[in-house]
Amino acid sequence: MAALYHSDMDVQFPNGKMLRLIRGDITIIRVDAMVNAANSGLQGGGGVDGAIHRAGGPAIMKDLDEIRAREGGCPTGSAVATGAGSLPAQYVFHAVGPIYRDGNHREAELLRSCYETSLALGEERGVRTISFPAISAGAYGYPMREAARIALEATGAHLARNDTGIREVLFVLATTEAYDVHSSVLAALRAKPLE
Ligand code: AR6
């Protein structure tokens, strides 16, 4: 049977956990939790956010309506959890990346925090597999190579730990360019140990 996707960039950690790069559409890949690149109003939008709401159906926005009524939205650098509607996942974590200005407005710290908050939401829910898009690297203008370094370092550090339950992190990259940049950054990080 033909595979739904192809990944030739898998990194296995000494503890058996995996980090994989996949070129494709995040909405069709089965995981426990799928991370969305949302905005602080949690209102939906274009890019991966649009794709997730289209594929997942209205149940996801219903959950977000409740969160918005309770909390007003989600601050940049954080994330909120909803159900996944008809997506092949149990949860969607809506992470709000920073809008890139010049790199001097805490962008790196806020982007790293998106990954760390999403991983923490996953641990709280017993998630074993989690998928990420390249948060902030589309409409929000984060330079792809720098965004990839932050994303791969933050998730690699989590996977390297022995006291956590997430076993597999998938980066699902929509374009060949994004995939190639992530591959090259990951290869450079592997030259020194991920920790
Ligand atoms: N699967 C995987 N990656 C995707 C998909 C997909 N189906 N579709 C797009 N991408 P963006 P941001 C990639 O703009 O920069 C929205 O309107 C895309 O090629 O989705 O964080 C939100 O509502 C790019 O590499 O997210 C916010 O207002 C990456 O996902 C704002 O955009 C992220 O691009 C967030 O901007």
Image (cartoon, helix red, strand yellow):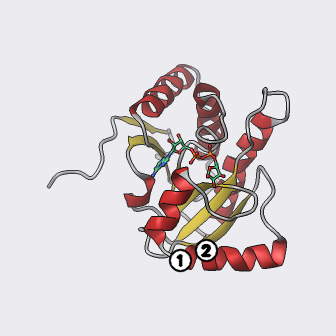
Q: Count residues near mark 1 (Cα–Cα under 10 Å), then give few for <14, some for 14-19, many for 20+.
A: some
* Residue 164 drawn at (x, y percent): 62, 56
Queried on whether the Cβ of the residue with tag 1 lies below 8 angstroms from ligand 1, the answer reads no
Queried on whether the Cβ of the residue with tag 2 lies below 8 angstroms from ligand 1, the answer reads no
Q: Residue 103's image quarter?
A: top right
Mark 2, secondary structure of its residue: helix
Q: Is residue 166 visible?
A: no
Residue at x-position 27% and y-position 52%: 4
Name the residue at the front extreme: 46
Residue at x-position 78% and y-position 36%: 107
Amino acid of disc 2: Met
Residue at x-position 59% and y-position 68%: 126
Q: Which image quarter holds the C terminus?
A: top right
Q: Count residues near mark 2 (Cα–Cα under 10 Å), then give few for <14, some for 14-19, many for 20+.
A: many
Q: Is residue 117 left or right of residue 167?
A: right
The numbered dot on residue 86 is none
- Disc 1 target residue: 58
Q: Nearer the viewer, residue 43 or 79?
A: 43
Give above or below for 146 relative to 50: above
Amino acid of disc 1: Pro
* Residue 50 drawn at (x, y percent): 53, 59
- Disc 2 target residue: 61
Q: Decide: marks 2, 1 in contact (CB < 8 A)?
A: yes
Looking at the rendered structure, the number of numbered marks drawn on it comes to: 2
Q: Nearer the viewer, residue 52 or 164?
A: 52
Q: CA distance from mark 2 to mark 1?
A: 5 Å
